[in-house]
Image (cartoon, rainbow, N blue to C red):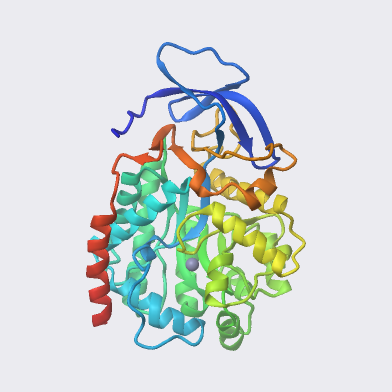
Amino acid sequence: MIPAPLNMSYLFKSALLVNLDPPRVERGDLRIAAGNIIERGSSLEAREDEEIIDLTGKLVMPGMVCAHTHLYSALARGMPAPPRTPTNFKEILEFVWWRLDRALDEETIYWSAMAGAMDAARAGTTCLFDHHASPSHISGSLQIVREAIEKIGLRAVLCYEVTDRGGSDERDRGLDENRSFLNWTKQTGSSKPALFRGLVGAHASFTLNDESLGACSELMRDFDAGLHIHAAEDMCDVNDARDKFGLGVVERLAKHGALNNQTILAHGVHLSVEDIEIARAAGVWFAHNPRSNMNNQVGYAPVEKFGERVVLGTDGIGADMFEEARSAFFKGRDEGLNFGADAWLRVLANNQRLASQAFGDDFGSLAPGSAADLVVLDYQSPTPVTPENLAWHFAFGINSAAVESMLVNGRFVIRDRLHALDDLCAESRRAAEKLWARLQRL
Ligand SMILES: [Zn+2]
């Protein structure tokens, strides 16, 4: 497949148009041009300059957004076991992830991002909030990630993970990497369409001293940006903040001025009631990552207490938001959470709201003027799909295998299940072998 030119116009005919919040299912047409939905109606007349695509029997919904991921871990699947089996969360970081990210070089950063972004595209995820770390190759790493994501055709909000774990020199280079990417987005942001934005990335309270946290917060102020940070993922973060600083994790972030309504707190598993109150008052987003939390055995996050601004992330376990939402639903049921399937549909819509805030555009409404980041689903349901039961189709039926096509900025990234780059697996397997060989030397 040859990628369509940017100025291509389409008329989607007779699709089932699906909105997540409030749930809406309506047969209709969409006219797409210059990156946006420009018209929506029950029967639009075709124009000469546009391609007509008959979507009878297909669903069209706004693109999925992943609110917290790590593309750098895309080549970790099946990697050699660590020298010792981790027995707690800190050891999972030390023995697995902090060795993997240190083994990344220019080539493997690129192929991790390519492989991860391709997975996302095939799952109907149009926008990624990525949290990157590659301590052996920090400077310029975000541009490598960006280049790969751009090649696949997605939209993304990037940041580099600032941490003290590699000493002050690595920390400073991490800060510089955030600064130079934020500068780059500032320069390119005014030209439409903006496909990339930045946040200030930080690992977690327990790997940042006061000076480092202060420097992150300064960057946030300089660029009017949010912070993207892991918060109370494990009790070790909570204990560290209490023992060293006599504060809650969020209380400590607040003290440094590191909270605002663009900030993403990932996990929040062990946040206290007081910390949650402070975070909610600052209007932060809480990124719930149920599969990662289960995998790391860190506990169940108090999602019911997080309020209205809950979003979902995969934390690097692919970027399939259908699967993440379904896992969130089942895990919530298992925990006795008072969240029906409809609540998780609202959370998926929040992910689109998060993207709307980051890009200053409308994602998620399918209304005229909104961004044409769309997913076409070939979902053959044995039962009717209605606004009233849509959430239950997401819980028990619709999955990413139904993704037939997806568009970002009005351009087909996947069309009829094909991507212009076709199969990257042979090349990413080669990169993975190199990465794993280096990993075993660390
Ligand atoms: Zn994470």
Question: In this orientation, which residue lies closer to the viewer: 357 or 216?
Answer: 357
343 to 272, vertically: above or below: above
Horizontal arrangement in the rendering, residue 295 relative to residue 194 (left or right) = right
Residue under the image location 32 percent in, 60 percent down:
112
**Where residue 16 sits: x, y (%)?**
60, 31
Residue under the image location 28 percent in, 77 percent down:
439
Question: In this orientation, which residue lies closer to the viewer: 382 or 47?
Answer: 382
10 to 301, vertically: above or below: above
**Where residue 385 sits: x, y (%)?**
68, 37
Question: In this orientation, which residue lies closer to the viewer: 187 or 228?
Answer: 228
**Where residue 194 sits: x, y (%)?**
42, 40
Question: In this orientation, which residue lies closer to the viewer: 12 or 267?
Answer: 12
Furthest toward the front, the residue is 382
Q: In the rendered view of the protein, which quadrant contains the C terminus?
A: bottom left
Q: In the rendered view of the protein, which quadrant contains the N terminus?
A: top left
Residue under the image location 50 percent in, 77 percent down:
210
Q: Is residue 233 visible?
A: yes
Residue under the image location 55 percent in, 34 percent down:
60
The image quadrant that residue 106 belongs to is: bottom left
Q: Is residue 106 visible?
A: no
3 to 206, vertically: above or below: above
Horizontal arrangement in the rendering, residue 266 relative to residue 23 (left or right) = left
The image quadrant that residue 70 belongs to is: bottom left
**Where residue 15 sits: x, y (%)?**
57, 28
Report the number of numbered marks.
0
